Image (tube, rainbow, N blue to C red):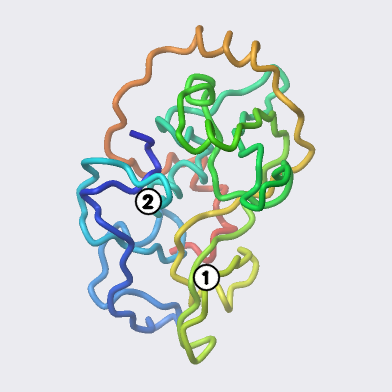
């Protein structure tokens, strides 16, 4: 089961009743520890069910698990560390064909976390249909989130949009579904090299509970809104 995919046990994404906190940021009326990723003020969309189980939904991502992988540069498929080239570049797997049928972009904003070598070559119904691009990425700045803006900023519910992390006004009123990185200076990866990395990669362990961020990572997350 892809680690970041929403599962049948979680049912669907869900936004319960929102209120405006004393600090001006929106929050759920009945808050839980998983409403925001550790050390981040960004409010995450909830799911109806709370237990990941059953068939994955290839079209919908778990907001919390996607944030866990995107923030920590972990594999979207198994939550292991992403593959790293000898130059220190991380591996990304993107669609080869866009939804309009033309070649898909290889630079710019993406909501897909990186990949380990094993998962990069793994069978995937979506990528098998549209093709895949294996890319080494030296620059992948955490840039923003996709989410829906709610009052008080807009006065009405707005459609989902990209909100950059330096836009605190909009970020304070956003219920987030996915974190976004900005991929730059990408280089094509040789599939044979990735296959060799996959052969040397340890067998993946079953992902456990999502942990708190290690202190060194937490210290570098000042850009994710305000810190508590």
Q: Quadrant of the C terminus?
A: bottom left
Callout 1 secondary element: loop
Determine whether, in the image, residue 48 is placed left or right of residue 121. left
Seen as rendered, the residue at the extreme bottom is: 155
Locate residue 48, reporting x and y percent.
23, 62
Q: Does residue 182 sit above or below 196 in this rendering?
A: below
Q: Quadrant of residue 21?
A: bottom left
Q: Residue at x 43, y 45 (%)?
A: 68
Q: Residue at x 21, y 54 (%)?
A: 50
Mark 2 surroundings within 10 Å by alpha-carbon count, few (fewer than 14), some (14 through 19), many (20 or more): many
Report the residue marked by disc 1: 160
Determine whether, in the image, residue 43 is placed left or right of residue 28. right
Q: Does residue 42 sit above or below 158 in this rendering?
A: above
Between residue 25 and residue 59, name the one nearer to us: 59
Verify CB contact (< 8 Å) between mark 2 and mark 1.
no
Mark 1 surroundings within 10 Å by alpha-carbon count, few (fewer than 14), some (14 through 19), many (20 or more): some
Instruction: Tell me the distance, in whole angstroms, between the alpha carbons under discs 2 and 1.
Output: 16 Å
| Residue 206, disc | none
Locate residue 161, reporting x and y percent.
57, 69
Report the residue marked by disc 2: 62
Q: Quadrant of residue 55?
A: top left
Q: Quadrant of the N terminus?
A: top left
Q: Which of the two labelled residues, at mark 2 and mark 1, occupies the earlier sequence position?
A: 2
Locate residue 6, reporting x and y percent.
34, 48
Q: How many marks?
A: 2
Between residue 111 and residue 40, name the one nearer to us: 111
Q: Residue at x 40, y 54 (%)?
A: 63
Callout 2 secondary element: loop
């Amino acid at each position: 089961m892809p680690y970041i995919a929403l599962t049948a046990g979680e049912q669907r994404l869900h936004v319960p009743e929102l209120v405006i906190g004393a600090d001006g940021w929106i929050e759920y009326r009945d808050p839980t520890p998983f409403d925001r990723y550790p050390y981040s003020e960004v409010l995450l969309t909830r799911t109806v069910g709370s237990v990941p189980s059953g068939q994955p939904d290839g079209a919908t991502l778990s907001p919390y698990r996607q944030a866990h992988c995107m923030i920590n540069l972990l594999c979207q498929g198994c939550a292991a560390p992403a593959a790293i080239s000898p130059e220190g570049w991380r591996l990304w797997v993107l669609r080869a064909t866009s939804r309009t049928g033309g070649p898909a972009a290889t630079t710019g904003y993406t909501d897909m976390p990186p990949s380990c070598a094993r998962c990069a070559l793994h069978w995937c119904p979506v990528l098998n249909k549209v093709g895949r691009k294996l890319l080494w990425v030296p620059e992948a700045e955490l840039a923003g989130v996709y989410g829906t803006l709610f009052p008080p900023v807009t006065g009405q519910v707005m459609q989902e949009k990209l909100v950059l992390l330096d836009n605190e006004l909009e970020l304070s009123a956003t219920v987030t579904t996915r974190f976004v990185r900005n991929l730059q200076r990408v280089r094509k990866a040789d599939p044979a090299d990735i296959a060799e990395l996959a052969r040397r990669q340890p067998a993946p362990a079953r992902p456990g509970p999502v942990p708190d961020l290690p202190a060194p990572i937490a210290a570098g997350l000042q850009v994710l809104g305000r810190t508590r």
